[in-house]
Each structure stands twice: as C-alpha cells, then as structure tokens.
Amino acid sequence: MPLVQDLLSLLELEPLEVNLYRGQNRDLGTGRVFGGQVFAQALVAARRTVEAPREAHSVHGYFLRAGDLKAPIVYFVDRPRDGGSFTSRRVTAIQHGEAIFHLSASFHLSETGLDHQGAMPDIPGPEDLRPELDMLRERADELPASIRTVLTQDRPVDFRLVPPSEQDWRHGAPARASWFRVISPLPDDVIAHQAILAYVSDYGFLPTALLPHGVSYRDPRLQIASLDHSLWMHRAFRADEWLLYVMDSPSAAGARGFVRGQIFTQQGVLVASVAQEGLVRVRGTGTAGTATA
C-alpha cells in the first residue's frame, strides 16, 4: 500500500559512507520534525551497523534542537562496543552542521531466561472503537486551518483512542490509552517493526501530562517539546497487528512533564515500555501547569 511504503521509505535511510546515513522528513503539522521520526531513523542507522541476529532492546535519545523540515538529517553512528552478547551504538543526528539529537542503543543476541510481566488493563478492544482519523475528519472545521489538511490526510497507521469514560482502570488520573497498527502487512524484517514502534511511541505521548490541568495541546500559551525519550523492547511483536499503548503521567513540575507507557499485544503480552520527560511550559499564567494531579 503506498502509504505504508512511504513510511517504510522514510525509515529506510540512504547510506552515504561507512557509519553515515541520510534521512528525509515528513510533515505532521507541527512545523518541525516529529520527534518519533528522528528517534526511529537514528535507531535504523544504528541497526544498519550491527550484525544479525542481534536486535535492539534498549534505546535512549536526547532531543537537542528542533529539526528543520526542509533539510535532510544526517546520522553518524559511533561503535563503542561489540561484545559476546551485547552490541552498543551511539548516533548523532545532524542538520546545518549542528547536532539536533543524540541516541544510545543496545542490541542483544536472543536468549532464554526468567520471564514475567505486568497485566494488561481491561479496556475495550480496537474493534469496539472508531479510528481517530474518522473523528478528526468529522470535526475538521474546528481544527486550525494551517494544519487541517495535514491532520486529516490518510495515514499509514490506524490509531483508535480509548475514551476516558472507558478507562476505569485509571479513572480521573492523567492517563490515556490507544490502540494502533499499520494498515497493511509489513515485511518480516525485525527492524521494520521496531522502527515503526519507535516512531509511534512518541505520538501523543507527552500531552498525557496536560490532562489534569485543562491545558489543550494547541493552547497558544503552551510551549511543549520532548527533551528525552527511552524505549525498551521486551518481546517480539508485529507493528501490523493491533498493539495497545497505555500511557500515564505520574509527575509534572518545574515546567517539565514526565510520562511513561506500556505497549501490549491484543493477547495481553507486554512487548515494550516507554518513558519520556518533556518541556511543558505555560506562559502568561501563574496557575496553569501547577495544579495537583
């Protein structure tokens, strides 16, 4: 399907030289490069330098500068260690001669061992929920004209938000949940699925910290941006099958919000954990952003 192929192409990267890759950008309506895009592209760049069958299990990134949508991003991969079971990589994303993002990733040879996990919350399945895109299109007239077309265009990923009234497991808390999957089958290459999960893991994540404060993501007083992002992948999964992203925000303070997430398969298998801290600055008020959750 063209939309999915466009997403795969976005994450493919162009090799320029040993340890050097170039990626293009996709506009999601924010006026800057989507954090999940640079996070996922940096992960792909790191994986290109790792011998199979080691796959990523721990990925950590720091956002240093806003990305320029009009310029490609160059990724330089450093190779600190190739061990017996683990491989470490560092990646620097560069635009206009300056670093905009740093990533550290660890890759692990598959092993068996102790196994336990937390339970998936009991909330409606994706079949009982409407696509987010359909709901956005129904109220397109309410969206800012400058981003209306971008927000209502066809997407390679189907998101289905769980209504707050159905989230009884966290009722009244700064929490949200969403099902997602790529809309057509993906190749079996593990990095394709991991990169798409990395891409999606930043979508709508930080705004979870806004929920108890009555501040909209599009409030003109709000300055919001990811500062760091961490992803741990515990078990195998497919991004073209339904995954549940459960998010909550245990703290907001000092103009920063902290959010964390868990990602489950439809069968309840915990496949990934996510954490992020971001800038959440509300200007022109002495009270917004300081309420107690």
Image (cartoon, rainbow, N blue to C red):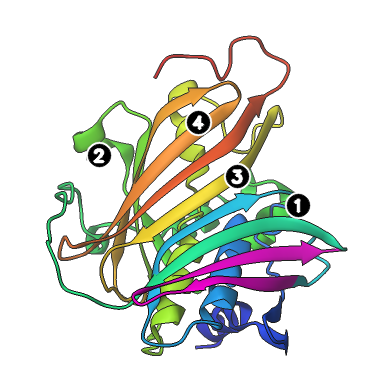
- The region drawn magenta spans 74-96
- Residue that badge 4 annotates: 210
| Up-down relation of residue 175 to residue 30 (above or below) | above
Residue type, label 1: Ser
- Residue that badge 2 annotates: 167
Residue 179 counted in the magenta span: no
- Local crowd size for mark 4, using a 10 Å CA cut-off: few (<14), some (14–19), many (≥20): many
SS type, badge 2: loop
| Up-down relation of residue 186 to residue 92 (above or below) | below
For the residues marked 4 and 3, what is the alpha-carbon distance in whole angstroms?
A: 13 Å
Q: Nearer the viewer, mark 2 or mark 4?
A: 4
For the residues marked 2 and 1, what is the alpha-carbon distance in whole angstroms?
A: 32 Å
- Residue that badge 3 annotates: 226
* Residue 14 on image: x %, y %: 69, 86
Whether residue 235 is visible to the viewer of this picture, yes or no, is yes
- Residue that badge 1 annotates: 146
Q: Earlier in the sequence, mark 1 or mark 3?
A: 1
- Local crowd size for mark 2, using a 10 Å CA cut-off: few (<14), some (14–19), many (≥20): some
Residue type, label 2: Gln
Residue type, label 3: Ser
- Residue 260 in the figure: left or right of residue 236: right
Q: Earlier in the sequence, mark 4 or mark 1?
A: 1
Q: Nearer the viewer, mark 2 or mark 1?
A: 2
Q: Nearer the viewer, mark 1 or mark 3?
A: 3
SS type, badge 1: helix
| Up-down relation of residue 100 to residue 186 (above or below) | above
SS type, badge 3: strand
Residue 86 counted in the magenta span: yes
Q: Main secondary structure of the magenta part?
A: strand
Q: Earlier in the sequence, mark 2 or mark 4?
A: 2
Residue type, label 4: Leu
- Local crowd size for mark 1, using a 10 Å CA cut-off: few (<14), some (14–19), many (≥20): few
